[in-house]
Amino acid sequence: QYVDVPNYSAILIRKSMPDLDKAGAIMDRCRGWFANTEAKWSERDMTWSFPTGGGTFSRLSFGAIDIPKDKYKYLGAEYQFIGIDELVQHPQEVYSYMFSRLRRLSDSGVPLRFRSASNPGGVHGEWVKEKFIPQEYLDASTTEQNSKVWSTRTDCGECNSTGLFDGQECIYCNGVGYRECWFVPSRINDNPSLDRREYLQSLINLPPVERYRLEHGDWTIAESGNIFKPEWLRYYTRRGEHYTLHRPDQPDLTIAIQELIFFVTADTASKEKTSADFTCISTWAFHQRSGSLILIHTLMTRMEVPRIAEAILN
């Protein structure tokens, strides 16, 4: 779209160039799409150029951002369309920075567009989920989730959500007082060209969480681990027979040791080799009156069964 417009420029980004050029990936597909057209491919620039008459061209480029500083490769570039595939592979600073490359001439009739696509999960999936996936979607039934397009709104900090900036309509939010991001859910059934049966048979080999995400495009399912948020954690000190719990939102709480219930948990494996799972043994104290759970000590190591019992006793 818009390749008939002189000097139009678009770029599609993934984490690495091989990701773009795999069998069936976008660069591979473009070779088939543009093979019998006037478009010319430049291996050096990773760009298709489309003649638009009078010696002018429009361009579709491909790029990679492997680590955050790679984003500066695009310093000075100007695009009217930016697309990032598998957004969860990128930190938010990369996504935010690329908006600075989205611009056009004042007389251009081409809209500025930034589009991202992604499966749920991934190393940077948490910020993507927080930015694009509204709580209403997470709380909705599966049928409702996939029945419409969703959006999240962020208050405009430039006009303090008033819609006015220096007495005029705020240009940063077009006078509405907020900025909006749109989320379009997608499932396997939404891709009619895919051999659904074969793909589902392939997915059965994946771990349950990853399989469910890819099969249903579901952002609600959580990893089996990483369920405790750092901001939930508090700290304590021990002095003699007393524990003092430091609570930023409340006064410190001092507890006598006899007020606590002590117990041990053990998540066990059974081998010592370096590739084996860890055995994790933790000692805890529970203060019933305040509902506080205190982690006293943790041992995480690889050990065989006879040593596990001894470690728990110790």
Image (cartoon, rainbow, N blue to C red):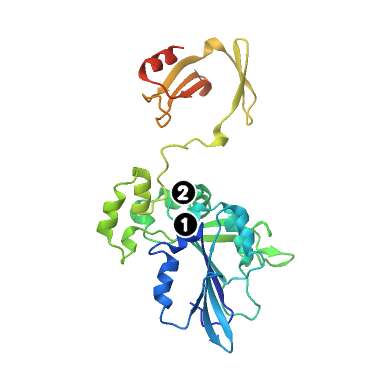
Nearer-N-terminus badge (1/2): 1
Q: Do residues under tags 1 and 2 come within 8 Å of each other at their CB atoms? A: yes
Numbered mark located on residue 86 in the image: 1
198 w.r.t. 309: above or below: below
**Residue 214 versus residue 183: which sits nearer the camera?**
214
Where residue 20 appears, as percent x and y from the top left, is 46, 62
**Residue 293 versus residue 102: which sits nearer the camera?**
102
103 w.r.t. 95: above or below: below
Q: Residue at x 33, y 64 (%)?
A: 191
Kind of residue at disc 2: Gly
Where residue 275 appears, as percent x and y from the top left, is 41, 32
Task: Please state if 77 lies on the left or on the right of 294 as rendered.
Answer: right
Quadrant in the rendering for residue 10: bottom right
Q: Looking at the image, which residue sits at the far front?
A: 44
Examine the rendering and report whether any part of residue 91 can be seen: yes
Q: Which residue is mark 2?
A: 122
**What's the CA distance linking mark 1 and mark 2?**
9 Å
Q: Secondary structure at mark 2?
A: loop
Quadrant in the rendering for residue 239: top right
Where residue 301 appears, as percent x and y from the top left, is 46, 24
Q: Residue at x 53, y 84 (%)?
A: 51
